[in-house]
Image: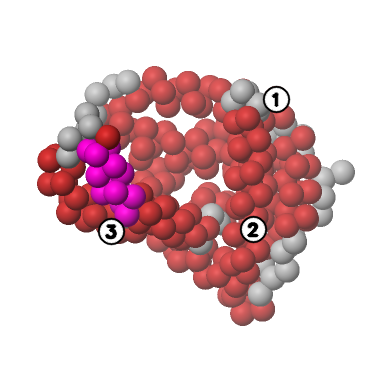
């Protein structure tokens, strides 16, 4: 069976980027969750198998010294993530996905790598204050006597500011990442290059930034629940999270109605 992504796509219902940027959009967290859940329910078993196989391959590849780490970071992991969006799109179009749809994330490996590289550079820039504070505290850390109570107190007094700065940088990183959450579907579904997808994602998300922040917080809570269920819950919450993120993209650009 020919993959839905290999077929010509009608753009009659797809909003242009200029239209979205000029006229805005309406996005309800409830609608996003409802749409994402509908898509996920259509393919729970497929998503579950894809998640297990994908992580198994990534973990095995990571065992290869150096090359495995590079391949995992710039090829396997981003293609794996993109696959969730692509499969969700296929299910949205015709109610099901083909085996070929799961591998479509590898079609744009160059854009995937650029997106990962941009994300990594952004994180490094955000965490520069942490690196600086650690370097400035290094001499004190080396001199501290960790065997005495006084030494432990000194250690904690040194690390407390570093940990505070790290917490702030982590929060900033999370808030910055929210601007990029539409990048993968814009690359693999809308067809933009990585640089254009990053730029467009930021410009679109900023229009309803706090809605997206709240959406990401609800997804975070969803996956915390998955962790609390002896980690087994993540097998279900992770695919659902991707479907919810896809739904946000879809409700902005595609305007699809809920799956029957």
Residue 48: image location, x then y, percent: 64, 26
Q: Which residues are magenta?
A: 150-162
In the picture, the disc for residue 232 is none
* Horizontal relation, residue 231 to residue 251: left or right: left
**Residue at (78%, 55%) from the top-left corner?**
31
Helix, strand or loop for disc 1: helix
Image: 161 above or below 71: below
* Horizontal relation, residue 185 to residue 156: left or right: right
Residue 207: image location, x then y, percent: 60, 72
Can you identify the residue that label 1 sits on? 45
Image: 205 above or below 225: below
Image quarter where the C terminus lies is top right
Q: Is residue 123 visible?
A: no
Can you identify the residue that label 2 sits on? 214
Sequence order check, earlier mark of 3 and 1: 1
**Residue at (57%, 33%) from the top-left corner?**
102
Q: Nearer the viewer, mark 3 or mark 2?
A: 3
The local crowd at label 1, few if under 14, some if 14 to 19, many if 20 or more residues have their Cα within 10 Å, is few
Q: Quadrant of residue 69?
A: top left
Alpha carbon of mark 2 to alpha carbon of mark 1: how far? 28 Å
Residue 237: image location, x then y, percent: 65, 35
Alpha carbon of mark 3 to alpha carbon of mark 2: how far? 27 Å
* Horizontal relation, residue 208 to residue 79: left or right: right
* Horizontal relation, residue 91 to residue 231: left or right: right
Residue 189: image location, x then y, percent: 57, 51
Magenta: main secondary structure equals helix
Can you identify the residue that label 3 sits on? 129
Helix, strand or loop for disc 2: helix
Alpha carbon of mark 3 to alpha carbon of mark 1: how far? 44 Å
């Amino acid at each position: 069976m020919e993959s839905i992504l290999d077929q010509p796509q009608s753009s009659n219902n797809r909003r242009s980027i200029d239209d979205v940027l000029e006229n805005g959009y309406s996005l309800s967290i409830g609608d996003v969750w409802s749409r994402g859940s509908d898509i996920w329910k259509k393919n729970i078993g497929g998503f579950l198998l894809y998640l297990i196989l994908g992580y198994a391959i990534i973990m095995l590849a990571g065992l290869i010294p150096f090359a495995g780490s590079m391949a995992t970071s710039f090829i396997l992991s981003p293609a794996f993530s993109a696959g969730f969006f692509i499969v969700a799109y296929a299910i949205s179009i015709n109610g099901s996905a083909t085996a070929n749809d799961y591998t479509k994330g590898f079609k744009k490996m160059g854009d995937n790598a650029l997106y990962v590289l941009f994300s990594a550079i952004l994180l490094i820039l955000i965490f520069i204050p942490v690196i600086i504070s650690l370097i400035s505290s290094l001499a004190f850390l080396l001199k501290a006597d960790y065997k005495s109570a006084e030494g432990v107190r000194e250690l904690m007094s040194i690390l407390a500011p570093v940990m505070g700065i790290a917490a702030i940088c982590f929060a900033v990183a999370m808030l910055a990442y929210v601007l990029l959450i539409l990048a993968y579907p814009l690359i693999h579904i809308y067809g933009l290059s990585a640089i254009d997808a990053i730029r467009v994602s930021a410009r679109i998300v900023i229009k309803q930034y706090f809605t997206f922040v709240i959406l990401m917080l609800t997804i975070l809570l969803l996956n915390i629940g998955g962790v609390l269920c002896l980690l087994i819950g993540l097998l279900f919450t992770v695919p659902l999270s991707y479907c919810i993120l896809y739904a946000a993209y879809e409700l902005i650009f595609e305007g699809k109605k809920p799956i029957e």
